[in-house]
Image: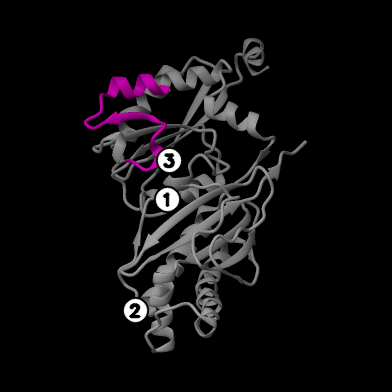
Amino acid sequence: MVYMVFEQRKDMKLRKNILIVDNNCELEQLVREPILKQFKDSGVSPVLIRAKDGAEAAIKSENQKFDMVLIDTEVPRLMDGGFVYGLHTYKNTQDAELLVVSTKDPSELPDSLQHCKFFKKPVSPAELINAMVAVLNAEHHGDVKPQAAAATAAAATKYAVDVRVINAVIKATTNVLAQFGVTDVKMDKAGPKSPHDPLMGEVSSVVDIQSQAFQGYLSVSFDKGSYLEVVSVMLMEEQTELNADNQDAVGEINNIIFGNAKAEISNFGVKMTVPRVILGANQSVPCAQGSAGMLIPFSTAKGKFYINVVALPVAKAA
């Protein structure tokens, strides 16, 4: 056991990586010295790594596993991207203890930040540091965090979501819709969704994607209102109903979206299939047990559309 190893080898330390998402260095400066001092003569070696915004946090979490994530919710590009919405599904942060510092009330935060250790600004330095020390000490002595225990009991598989792919698809979707004159797109609160539930939309397109960090699929689904809004511009004629003449346009729309996204995604070593079209409401995409899903809803002036991300389970190495 890990604890027994530390009893036998005092010179060996257990490295604990802490990601601090903090654009002005205040949090890092607040906790760095006290945390390092607290564990100077212990069996734990805290390693503090800072990200200046949500995008940089996503990149850093692609390349390194973190045991704790400390977030200031005021940092740029945090709430408008995929990072904050899937912290407990990404491979390198899914077991991390989450601490959040915010001027907002807990009820105003996304669902993914609801079950965290919350600190209202202005934060008490002693309270924050004590919470971090308690987490690191608990992990050192082998306590199992509730979310990790639940995940282990649920399945013997793990999965990972490549947030860069999600962000690339979001960017491509909004850019393409803007080209068609749909400029009032608003991203609503994303959250987990069962991958076995039907797609939310009446016309959808699905692509399979695979990389070293991700195996699964993405879909873009339009409801009737948002789809007719886009296709009316494409066909240069007002469309009021879904019919055989305008349903084929979904393939063209999503080919453009995923084509634009592919230019960026290919830089990440991601393989993507040709989009396949699914017509009709309440359609499902079969996936294995143990898969994980995330739904990112958007609204336009005339309807809604959805980006659905499903990560397939990756078996543990023997």
Q: Circle 1 is placed at which residue position?
A: 190
Q: Position of residue 27 (x, y in %)?
A: 31, 34
User: Does residue 126 appear to the left or right of 90 in the view shown?
Assistant: left
Name the quadrant of the N terminus. top right
- Please provide percent x and percent y for residue 69: 44, 35
Label 1 vs label 3: CA separation? 9 Å
Kindly state the secondary structure of the residue where label 1 is placed.
loop
Q: Is residue 156 shown above or below 280?
A: above
Give amino acid for label 1. Answer: Ala
**Viewer-nearest residue: 10 or 83:** 83
Q: Earlier in the sequence, mark 1 or mark 3?
A: 3
Q: Which residues are magenta?
A: 109-132
Label of residue 73 in the image: none
Residue 305, magenta (yes or no) = no
Q: Amino acid at mark 2?
A: Gly
Q: Quadrant of residue 180?
A: bottom left
Q: Upstream in the sequence, badge 2 or badge 3? A: 3
Q: Which residue is mark 3?
A: 112
